[in-house]
Amino acid sequence: MRFVRGFGQFWYDFLIGDDWKIAAAVVTTLAAGAVVLLTVHPDEKVFTVCLGLAVMAAFALVLRIDVRGKD
Amino acid sequence: MNAAVWGLATAVFLAAMVEMVEALTIVMAMGMTRSWRSTLIGAGTALVALAAFTAVFGYAITTWLPEAALQLAIGGLLLIFGQQWLRKAILRSAGLKAMHDEDEIFAREVADAERAGAVPRGLDWFSFVVSFKGVFLEGTEVVFIVLTFGLSARNMPVAIVAAVAGCLVVLGLGIAVRGPLSRVPENTLKYGVGLLLASFGTFWAVEGLGVFRSGRESLAWPGSDLAILALILGWFALSRLMIMSLRGGQTRGRDSAPEPAEYGAHRGDS
C-alpha cells in the first residue's frame, strides 16, 4: 500500500508539480479548443494562433492567482 | 538541420545538463562522505532501471497512439511540464522564490549522510538508496523530455545524442572540479529550458487537436516550423512582463510579501 501511494505521489509530483492549477488550465484550454474546433470549424491558421495565445493567457492568469493567493 | 531540430537539440542538451548537475551533487555528497562503491552501484542500478522504463514507456506510447493523438498527449504533458519550470523561473527572477543553490544542497546532503551513522563494511544502503533515488528521479525528467521531444519531432537520434552530450559535459566538469557545480548558471538554464518546453509544448499540443477532426490529421500552424520561433518569442515576452509585474507588486506590498522560499517545495524543489 505504501509503495502504491509513493508511486502515485511520484507521478503526481512529476506531472502536476507544485501548482495543480497549471495542469488544470492547460487541460481546460485544450478542451475548449477542441470544442471550438468541432462546433465552429474555424480557419485552421487563425485557430492555431488564437489557441496558442489562449494557452499563454491561461498561464498568466494562473500565476497571478497563485501569487495573489499567497500574499 | 531545421529550426525544429536545432530547438530540439538545444532544449534536450540544456535540460540534461540541469538535471545532471542536480544528480551529480547528490552522488558526490554520498561518495565523498560515505562510500563511493555503494554510491556508484546505486547510480548504476538507477541507470539500468531508467533504461527499462524508457523502453517500456517509449514502446507503449508509439505503439498505441496515432500520430495526432501522440502530439496532443505528449504536447500537453510537455506544456504542463514546461509551464512548471517557467513558473519557478519567473518566481525566482521576481524574488518570490529562493534561488536554486547547489552548494547549499550539497551541504544538506553531506549533513544527512553524516547523521546516518557509521559506514558498514559491505554495501552501504544509505548511500545506495540516496544515489539511486537522486539519479532515477532526475533521470526520469531527462527521459521524459527526450521521449516527448524525440517522438514529436520524429528525431529520436538527435534527442538521445543531445541528452548524452549534456550529461557527459556535466560529468566531465564534475570530475574536473571534484565538487558540486555551483558555478553552472543553473537558474538561467532552467529559465531557458522552461521557455523551450512551453513553446514546443504549445506547438505540438495545438497541432495534435487535429485528432478530433474527421481525417484525424494534425493542424498546421502558419509558417509551419517557423511558428516555433514566434512561440519562443511570445513566451519570453510574457515571462518578462510577468516578472516586471510581480516585482512591481512586491515593491508595493513589501511589508506583507512572503519569504522567497515559500513557493513550491516538491521534488527537491528543482
Image (cartoon, coloured by chain):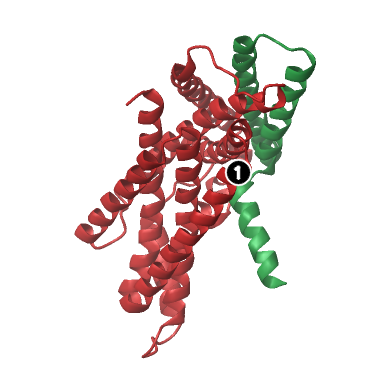
Chain colours: A green, B red
Return the residue at label 1. B258
Give neighbour class at mark 1: few <14, some 14-19, many 20+ (Cα, 10 Å): some
| Res B104 seen here | yes
B120 w.r.t. B46: above or below: below
Task: Report if residue B185 is visible in the image.
Answer: no
Q: Quadrant of the N terminus of chain A?
A: bottom right
Chain for mark 1?
A: B
Q: Amino acid at mark 1?
A: Pro
Q: Residue at x 36, y 36 (%)?
A: B9
- Residue B205: percent from the left, percent from the top? 60, 30
Asked if B246 appears above or below B37 in the picture, the reply is above
Secondary element at tag 1 = loop
The structure residue drawn at horizontal position 38% and vertical position 23%, both measured from the top left corner, is B3
In the rendered image, the residue lying farthest to the bottom is: B121
* Residue drawn at the location 53% of the way across and 37% of the way down: B82
Left or right of B265, for residue B130: left
Q: Position of residue B149 (x, y in %)?
A: 47, 38
Towards the viewer: B182 or B127:
B127
Q: Is residue B43 left or right of residue B247?
A: left
Quadrant housing the C terminus of chain A? top right
Q: How many circles with numbers are drawn on the protein?
A: 1
Dividing the picture into quadrants, the one containing residue A54 is: top right
Residue A68: x percent and y percent? Answer: 68, 34
Of residues B259 and B42, which is closer to you in this image? B42
Residue B113 in the image: state x and y as whole percent.
42, 75
